[in-house]
Image (cartoon, rainbow, N blue to C red):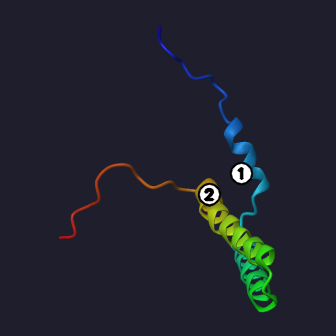
Amino acid sequence: MVFQAPDDDNDAMLLAGILPQSVGPYVSLMMAGFLIAVVGHLSRSRWLIGLGIIIVFLAAAALPLALNAFSDQPEPPGPLPRPY
């Protein structure tokens, strides 16, 4: 029995349509996360610190996914070219 992929298997790309295509929202989200964490440290609130860390992590994880999903030209497969 041979497994054959369906012709239209782009269901995984539905999330890519939701993600913003520019870097600005991700940088803003990271800065907001850092600001929330700093306010949490100043007020000694553990849940604010945790919320800030989670926001920074989500922004940092979503940025490479969005850049990879929206890049026009993927990285070529194979070994790197020789430097000389």
Q: Observer-nearest residue: 17 or 73?
A: 17
Mark 1 → mark 2, Cα distance in angstroms: 8 Å
Q: Residues within 10 Å of mark 1 (few under 14, many from 20)?
A: some
Q: How many marks?
A: 2
For the residue pair 28 and 35, the one nearer the viewer reads as 35
**Residue behind mark 1:** 16
Pointer 1 with pointer 2, Cβ within 8 A: yes
What residue lies at 64% left-to-right and 57% top-to-bottom?
Answer: 70
Image position, residue 19 (x, y; %): 75, 58
Position of residue 2 in the picture relative to residue 35 (left or right): left
Which residue, given by chain and number where applicable, does mark 2 sit on?
A: 65
Residue 7 occupies which quadrant of the picture? top right
Name the amino acid, label 2.
Leu
| Residue 33, position as x, y percentages in the image | 74, 77
Q: Earlier in the sequence, mark 1 or mark 2?
A: 1
- SS for tag 1? helix
Residue at 69% of width from left, 44% of height from top?
13
Could you say where residue 12 lies in the image, as x and y percent from the top left?
Answer: 68, 40
Label 2 sits on a secondary structure element that is helix
Q: Is residue 9 above or below residue 28?
A: above
Q: Residue at x 21, y 64 (%)?
A: 82
What is the residue that sits farthest to the top in this orientation?
1
Looking at the picture, how far across and down is residue 2, in whole percent?
47, 12
Which residue extends farthest bottom? 42
Question: Can you say whether 67 is above or below 11 in the image?
Answer: below
Which disc, if any, is residue 58? none
Q: Is residue 71 left or right of residue 14?
A: left
Callout 1 amino acid:
Ala
Q: Residue at x 53, y 56 (%)?
A: 73
Quarter of the figure with residue 45 = bottom right
Asked if residue 69 lies left or right of residue 16, the reply is left
Residue sitting nearer the eye, 47 or 72 = 47
